[in-house]
Image: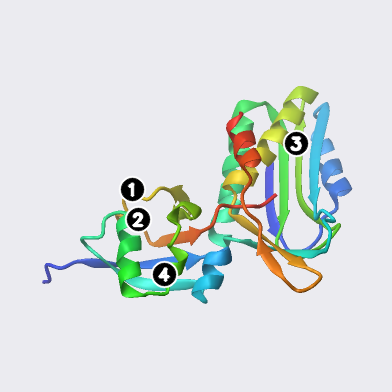
Amino acid sequence: MTAIMSHQLKIVYFAWVRERLGRDQDNIDCPENVETVGQLLEFIRSEDVAYEDVFADIEKLRFALDQDFVGLDAAIDTAKELAIFPPVTGG
Amino acid sequence: MISITVQENDFDSGGEINRLSALGGGAISSFVGQVRGDEQLQALELEHYPAMTENALQKIADKASQQWVMHGITIIHRVGRLQVGEQIVLVCTCSDHRQAAIAACSYIMDQLKTVAPFWKKEIFQDGTENWVKERQSDLDAAKSW
């Protein structure tokens, strides 16, 4: 029995976010005290300085949790996949 | 009948229109987007989020079906490298009357521009690249419905 819970979260990147990081995904252990998307961004930024450049202007980023658009205050809960990308430009 | 396809290959817009026509509605509307021949532009690189794309397009089509009485909706969006002049996207709608067919087609394109996870990178003849930025006019259009 362990009191400290964490869960595996896959983070996927697209467009210039992917290019600047130089990889298209990460798998992280999401600590229990990280509850929202915004808190998760702070957590991964503290783990890897490569994020500093990408997260410099957070207004330019969009997020999806398990393939649904969410804001920074969205609860991660039991989500399996977070996507980080710039505003979409299809069509 | 809703048909959603994300593919690298080109599509036959005439054939797709005929397929929807066969459903028997009185009005077919369609939109084809293609790579604009901007100066010095050689190609676009279209990237998407495979796990999310088709579901996002399906949701847009479902909302259109709730808003207007539709016989059929076809959405085809290409990904990968597309040269100037190549087709990118097709939206085709079939309804009993033109107002519904035209409005649904326009609605689907406006929503697609702002919520479907596609990203365009411009590749210029001199080898430089540029990720296309979102446009306020597209955001305004999507909100206008």
Q: Point out the tag, 1 or 2, that comes first from the N-terminus.
A: 2
Query: In terms of depth relative to the viewer, which is nearer, B74 or A61?
Result: A61
Q: How far separated are the C-alphas under marks 4 and 2?
A: 15 Å
Q: Are marks 3 and 4 in contact (CB under 8 Å)?
A: no
Q: Could you classify mark 2 by the number of other residues whose Cα lies within 10 Å: few (under 14), some (14-19), or many (20 or more)?
A: many
Label 1 marks a residue whose chain is: A
Which amino acid, mark 2?
Val
**Amino acid type shown at disc 3:** Thr
Residue marked by disc 2: A37
Q: Are marks 3 and 2 on the same chain?
A: no
Q: Are marks 1 and 2 in contact (CB under 8 Å)?
A: yes
Q: Are marks 4 and 2 on the same chain?
A: yes
Indicate the quadrant containing the N terminus of chain B: top left, top right, bottom left or bottom right.
top right
Q: Could you tell me which residue is drawn at 54 percent across and 60 percent down?
A: B51
- Give the alpha-carbon distance from disc 3 to disc 2, as whole Å: 37 Å
- Circle 1 sits on which residue? A73
Q: Secondary structure at mark 1?
A: loop
Q: Are marks 3 and 1 in contact (CB under 8 Å)?
A: no
Kindly report which numbered mark, 4 or 2, lies closer to the viewer in this rendering.
4
Query: Residue B100 at what x, y percent from top left?
Result: 73, 25
- Chain hosting mark 4: A
Q: What is the three-letter code of the residue carrying label 4?
A: Tyr
Q: Are marks 3 and 1 on the same chain?
A: no
**In terms of secondary structure, where does tag 2 sit?**
helix
